[in-house]
Image: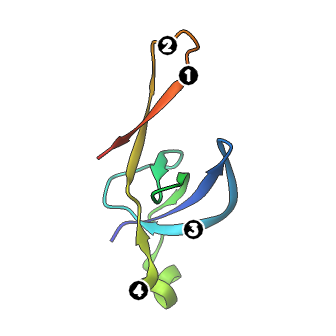
Amino acid sequence: MNLIKARFLRYGEPSGREYTYISNVPVKVGDLVQLNERGQGIVTEINVPESEVESFRDRLKSIIGKVEVKETEAADNESEAVLDE
């Protein structure tokens, strides 16, 4: 089991406390991930020891996937987030 910690993004910035998730895809610190249907977050720690989650291991959730940020060719140069499955 690959455990990571991540913070939700609020207005594009990491906010609040860290939450522990199971990651079935390889990620590194600083990667953008889809944490649930509505929220994205940034990975703050990888290789979290299982001993840290022993008391709530049965309630851990998995991330949906890693988000790949691609630059668009739009005139305003906005970034487009695409879920990498």
Please tell me how many numbered marks the rendered image carries. Answer: 4
Depth check: 38 or 18 in front? 38
Local secondary structure at mark 4 = helix
Real-space Cα separation, disc 2 to disc 4, in angstroms: 45 Å
Tag shown at residue 78: 1
Real-space Cα separation, disc 1 to disc 4, in angstroms: 40 Å
Q: In the image, what residue type sits under mark 2?
A: Ala
The residue furthest top is: 75
- Which scheme is used to colour this image of the protein? rainbow
Depth check: 58 or 51 in front? 58
Say if mark 1 contacts mark 2, CB within 8 Å: yes
Q: Which residue is mark 4?
A: 58
Q: In the image, what residue type sits under mark 3?
A: Tyr
Q: Which residue is mark 2?
A: 74
Q: Is residue 68 left or right of residue 1?
A: right
Tag shown at residue 19: 3
